[in-house]
Image (cartoon, rainbow, N blue to C red):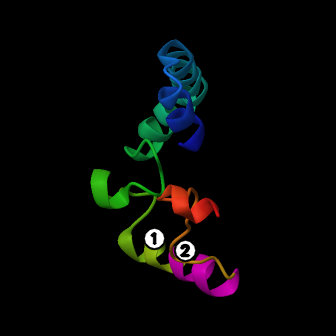
Amino acid sequence: MFLIWSIVKAKKRRLVLGFLVMVVVTGSPWYVRNYLISEDPIFPFGGKIFGYSWLWNENDAAGAANDLYGAHGTPRTIKIIPLTPTEFS
């Protein structure tokens, strides 16, 4: 996201469009595969949006999240890019 924001800020929209096309072309086979198997293109993260299927239910998602947050020390919120320019200093 930061890369896209900086390129847009530099007014190189053609570069952004090329980048987004490559992301879609690269990821689309997996999104289609996931949709055909589970009816959720971003399986298992889209259960609340696309609904749960025979492959994954709400309890499975809650258990996986608890395992990820509890056992591996993953923070519940991850701040990836600074929100304001003053956070650089």
Q: How many marks?
A: 2
Q: Check disc 2 and give the amino acid type.
A: Ala
* Residue farthest toward the right in the current orientation of the protein: 72
Q: Check disc 1 and give the amino acid type.
A: Ala
Q: Nearer the viewer, residue 35 or 78?
A: 78
When the figure is inspected, residue 7 is found, relative to residue 49, above or below; the finding is: above
- Please name the residue that numbered disc 2 is placed on: 64
Question: Which residues, given as a range, are shown in magenta?
Answer: 65-72
Tell me if residue 66 is in the magenta stretch. Answer: yes
Secondary element at image label 2: helix
Q: Residues within 10 Å of mark 1 (few under 14, many from 20)?
A: some
Kindly identify the residue that appears in the image at 48 percent across and 51 percent down: 43
Q: At which x and y percent is residue 42? A: 46, 46
Asked which quadrant contains residue 70, the reply is bottom right
* Residue farthest toward the top in the current orientation of the protein: 14
Magenta highlight: main SS: helix
Kindly identify the residue that appears in the image at 56 percent across and 35 percent down: 6
Q: Nearer the viewer, residue 74 or 85?
A: 85
Q: At which x and y percent is residue 11? A: 49, 20
- Please name the residue that numbered disc 1 is placed on: 61
